[in-house]
Image: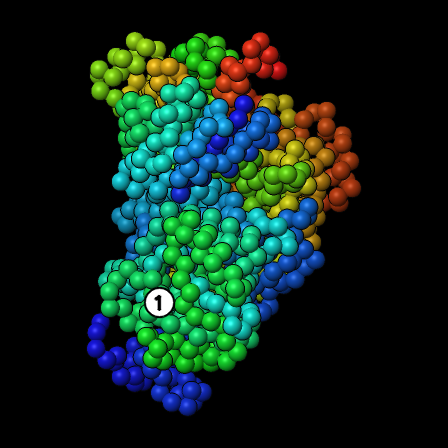
Amino acid sequence: MRFGVVVFPGTWSDCDFHYVISEVLHEPVKYVWHRDRDLDDLDCVILPGGFSYGDYLRAGAVAGRSPVVEALRDFVARGGYVLGSCNGFQILCEAGLLPGALLRNECLQYRCQSTHLVVENVETPFTRGLRPGQVLTMPISHGEGKYHADPETLRLLKDQRRIVFRYADAEGRVTRAANPNGSLENIAGLVNPEGTVLGLMPHPERAAEAALGSTDGLLLFQSLLGSLVEDGSFLKR
Amino acid sequence: MTGAPPKVTLDLARDSGLTAEEYDRILQRLGREPTYAELGLFAALWSEHCAYKHSRVFLSRLPTEGARVLQGPGENAGAIDIGDGWAVVFKIESHNHPSFIEPFQGAATGVGGILRDIFTMGARPIALLDSLRFGEFDDPKTRRLVEGVVSGISWYGNCFGCPTVGGEVAFAPEYAGNPLVNVMCVGLVRADAIFRARAEGVGNPVFYVGNKTGRDGIHGATMASATFDDSASERRPTVQVGDPFTEKLLLEACLEAMKTGAVVGIQDMGAAGLACCTSEMPARAGTGMDVELSRVPQREVAMTPYEILLSESQERMLLVAARGREEELRRIFAKWELDAVEIGRVTASGTLTARLRGQVVAHVPVNLLAEAPKYTKPTAPPAWLAERLAFDPLTLPEPADYGEALLALCASPTIASKEWAFRQYDQQVGLNTLVLPGSDAAVLRVKGTSRALAVSTDGNGRHVFLDPRRGAAMAVSEAARNVSCSGATPVGATDCMNFGSPERPEILWQFAHAIDGIAEACRALEIPVVGGNVSFYNETNGQAILPTPIIGVVGVLEDTGRRATQWFKASGHRVALLGPPHVSLGGSEFLWRAHRRLCGTLAPLDLEVERKVQAAVRAAVSAGLVTAAHDCAEGGIAVALAEGCVSGRGLVGCDAALDTADRADQVLFGEGPSRVVVAVEPERVRAFEALMAESAIPWRWIGATGGDRLVLRRGTTTLVDVALDRIEGAWRGGFERHMA
């Protein structure tokens, strides 16, 4: 599977995703400059964390209108996979590739901490290797991660089972205390109707090695890789 | 400002911070009156902040050499060889004055400045640590200052993308009018690819890169070279405004440019901005520089040569390129959407010639600018010191309840958990942080090798106040001990010397003795000082801060898997205290919290014992014999054990016996150097005992982990018996409750 990690001015999780994909997963990966429109040789595009364009105007607002994100629409229409984490999730919402918006954290401060995520939908390419109700440990690091959507959108997201992760406690209970940023109904991650575009505020790349505290982030990649292997053998590795 | 520049007179020179003698010297050496722009150059470059004119004679006493040292003091930062072709580049710097005037931008640009010092060396910054000092929370300003400083650090560091992994925060009334913001940055570079701030090669083009120049920060260096009074807020315009996004672009552009081989030398435009770079870079290389100021990218109109030279606008660099390779550089900076403008050439003249539209506005020998006068001002011990030292803390009453006394100490904002601050900082970007903030030292792996770096910053103003020499030596020892507790071997240090006005003999006396103490400890522990910063004039309305040297130590851990953290991991482990029994309540956190007194004498420091204890801890960690190692610092052994119980993921109790004849408050809360608490699994006890016997250090078993209480006994008496959830509540809430 060929991965592309997009680099905007101000992106900083680009190297981390690149490292995990090449050094931990041993899959082919390259950087994609924000002015590039050619995504033809890629199977999955990563929109990493950081402060693209300094988050000026709104987080992700400028990047959401960049050439590479314009090209993503065709890429998605052709069935390509997109994973946006942190600033990448903000960019996907700003670009309209996912619904809703990410607002300033309810505490009005930046938050860098470990969180627990409960898995709600295991029928997406990114979560098919997981169990429903499984609890993942993954860090967050953001100032604007409070997910918001209007009631109609929220109903649609629920009807279409597009809410993939919610912030939860260690036992998987979705509580107010476990919500680090005031997100609507503890929403931490969601997908497009086809399930091929995933946006989440937590950082899977920071939970990809035991030495750094968790390997749960790898499960997303392994699910995705499994989706491309006919017999699902990747999942058994 | 338009029209003709003001006429240069002695009065004007005095107003800009120069003395009559210094002005005379300028007249004599130039053989004429300086122009207004030239006066600005001298005022900035001969300021204490840039020239270290009161401290240089003392700083030369520090040991700066060692087999691993690749770059000592005098460059943007120091560099140490860590093996496998890698070097660690690091430095600590203060941004105290700006942070008092405007806490958010002051702290933010402090982070920005030290980041640039690291990446101008060619290194990618991998970690930030902040040492902060504030007044007590009963001062109504404190909360606002803490909020401003922490959010400024958070904003700049997070947006730039360098993790904040450590540091400390302490509170004392002496910092109320003058908080301290010291930031240390650590970077990694290939040992053969270190860049230096030298303008080599006559005829090479000089490039201005990065942000545009505005009027912000003019006189920043001179502001940092004077004390404050109540009008400090009027100086707000001298504080620079940061842009971490531009800094991130500058980082990527500079590192990419350096890879091409087209960069000859590079320096950050920090204090005294363009003036500093255009004189220091040629001075280091024995060359000159000829620059055209109208080419400098500007974001304000009608800037004068004086303003362009002295602006401290952030996120700018001066770069000397290899002639003929200008296009390559322009392409890279254009890709990152940054200005890169050729503003002049390196010359053989030995002078800095600055022009405005061709007309010379300054023409000064670079050596004259770079070689400010050095002063050896009088020093004298403070008159009040003898009385403070003579007071015996043991004449004060003992606490009625030692358990409550321990809880009060755990809730002291200085000792309590700093999670409120750290959770606002990105701690992990870069995927290197193996030990997050909260242990004695942060540990960062070096990818592609089996090694890791351990980093810690420490300093205790009360100790240095009572005994500058021993207190400063203890700060070095503690920073090194924290690194050793993680299992790493200290390899280099950086110092940030925060003091009052050096023109007062008692302050300079504190400074001189503190330097001697640092030198002594660094020699004994074989840790070269490869860079640092002096911040004088930390006083407001005549009230100086506690003399506060902050020491940053970097260590190398040979095997990332063989490391230790400070918290107890499980029940049933035996607990030992390594190091001497000597402690004192003099200058302790307990004496301040319980009795509001700063007096007494410090415990003795035997550097040979310190060295051996650290070596023993490292040996025990690397042999996998200990499950926790924690330095005894503020609050003494009682607090060290309490932190061992509650600072980890789960709570682990402890029962320990402290059998010395001293009074109980001294036994529990007395502070002394060279002491480390370790926990050992039962099956490793014999091996551990054998190693300790070999190490020839004082040590003894004091108890075991287990249960849900911390119990501290002496003989048949139980001094402390407190439930862990109460300790945890006090420790977790002690700082945060003031910020809620």
What residue lies at 70% left-to-right and 32% top-to-bottom? B625
Left/right of residue A133 with respect to residue B361 in the rendered view: right
Left/right of residue B190 with respect to residue A104 in the rendered view: right
Say few, some or many: other residues with alpha carbon within 10 Å of mark 1 (under 14 / 14 to 19 / 20 or more): some
Q: Nearer the viewer, residue B234 or B128?
A: B128
Q: Nearer the viewer, residue B448 or B149?
A: B448
Q: Is residue B539 visible?
A: no
Task: Report x, y in % for residue B154.
Answer: 38, 43
**Within the image, what quadrant is residue B308 found in?**
bottom left
**Within the image, what quadrant is residue B309 found in?**
bottom left
What kind of residue is marked 1?
Answer: Arg
Task: Report x, y in % for residue B126.
Answer: 52, 44
Colour mode of the rendering:
rainbow
Which residue does the numbered mark 1 point to in the structure image? B295
**Looking at the image, residue B358 lies above or below residue B523:** below
What residue lies at 53% left-to-right and 78% top-to-bottom? B348
Left/right of residue B142 with respect to residue A114 in the rendered view: left
Q: Quadrant of the N terminus of chain A?
A: top right
